[in-house]
Amino acid sequence: MDRAVRLVVMPDASTATKLSSMERYRFKRALEDIEHAEGRGTELVSVYVPPDRPIFEVTNYLRGEYSQSSNIKSTSTRKHVMQAIESIINRLKQWRMPPPNGLVCFVGHKDIGADQTSMVAYVLEPPEPVASFLYRCDSRFYTEPLHEMLAEKDVYGLIVIDRNEATLGVLRGKRIETIKNLESLVPGKHRMGGQSARRFERLIELAAHEFYVKVADIATEAFLNRRELKGLLIGGPGYTKDYFVKEEYLHHELQKKVLETFDTGYTNENGLRELVEKARDLLVGLDLMREKSLVQRLMDEIRKEDGGLATYGEAQVRHALVVGAVDTLLVSEGLRKLRLKVRCANGHEEERTVADEATLPKCPTCGAEYTILEKRDIVDEFSGLADRTNAKVELISADSDEGQTLMKGFAGIAAILRYRVT
Ligand code: ZN
């Protein structure tokens, strides 16, 4: 079986670096499948073609690899590698030059258990240009460069600080990562015997100063060489954070990137979360914030006594989409379900949603087994329905709190409505 998937994830050039969430989702799903594949020998072929490489050069190279592979000892590996290379050569025929970002091909026989293999073939137009030509034959497909391309590009540096403690972190897309937590040696209120109040005061100031310098040094190390750093957010419970900024402890390049300071109750990891929360309005463009407010809007509607302009659950949302009542469709990226069109031996046809094809029940009417006529990822099905009535589609990441709410509370699908559906 030769299952070919061709993904075009490259939007027009003006938005080249910013994939829509749907494109990102499709790309990620394809990657999941690709990475899942395992060869029985070193027989999975990955080819990366940069945009400026004429296809005939690639084809010539592959022909060379093809003759080389005739030396492979194992009969089945040899056969599989040669088939994979042949398949790639055939697929590349439709181009003379690669598309604007180049091409990535993954072709090979993957192990499907019970001594069986199945041929898979993916040809992708990546979201960013392929940097250099690469041919690899291994027991797994080589996907690392694609992960690099998919990495979230908006990064913010986070610092929460007071006299006793500071924590540095980064906000990358939706995730908050802690870089370092440190405690100061600034003496507490109780001075040692024999010290004058004044001398003690000076000691405190000195120790505090040294602490701020240290925090700034760590910030330099963590943030200065990050080109993708969009800005710095500084938080803390008291005056220290403002003093830290005003006295320009930070490296001058970082000082320029300070966006704003915010009051937070904590200076530990919780403080980082508080800081991001407080910076909400500021970061409104960030996906994290967009997702947060969307799910918040959904919850606000649902809490209304009359049920509000919201609906959730697969059947209800599908109905609302079909009648054109959906303003914004919220789908969890964590949703892994298939929408199947099935028919039993006695001709009973039905549509079913399943988590896994293997769990497909028998026909309730006659008890016969179903045959699958059509299969779609449910996220694709729903976004298709949404497109027909110009409903907005928002994919909500599975790892945020809001994503968890959507996934656990509403089975991964909900909608904000244009009008109420009965
Ligand atoms: Zn039946």
Image (tube, rainbow, N blue to C red):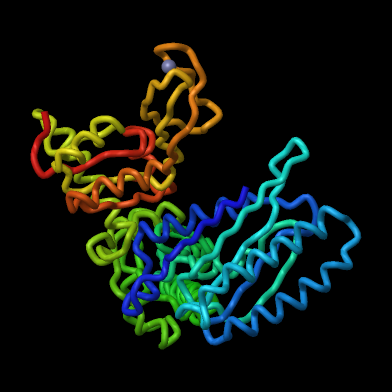
Between 304 and 362, the one lying in front of the other is: 362
Q: Is residue 309 visible?
A: yes
Percent across and percent down for residue 187 are 50, 64
Q: Which is nearer the eye, 222 or 396? A: 396
User: Residue at (62%, 54%) from the top-left corner?
Assistant: 120
Quarter of the figure that contains the C terminus:
top left
The outermost residue toward the front is 346
Is residue 202 in sight in this rendering?
A: no
In depth, the one of 44 and 225 nearer the eye is 44
Residue 311 percent across, percent down from the top left: 20, 35
Q: Is residue 364 above or below residue 153?
A: above
Please tell me how many numbered marks the rendered image carries. Answer: 0
Tell me which image quadrant ligand 1 sits in.
top left
Q: Is residue 14 left or right of residue 24?
A: left
405 displayed left or right of 359: left
Q: Quadrant of residue 127?
A: bottom left
Q: Residue at x 36, y 26 (%)?
A: 350
Tell me where residue 82 sits by quadrant.
bottom right
| Position of 325 relative to 63 (above/below) | above
Q: Residue at x 55, y 77 (%)?
A: 130
246 relative position to 73: left or right: left
Residue 281 image position (x, y, % from top left): 22, 62
Location of residue 290 by image quarter: bottom left
The spot of residue 195 in percent (x, y) is 50, 69
Q: Who's the residue at 27% across and 39% down the image? A: 414
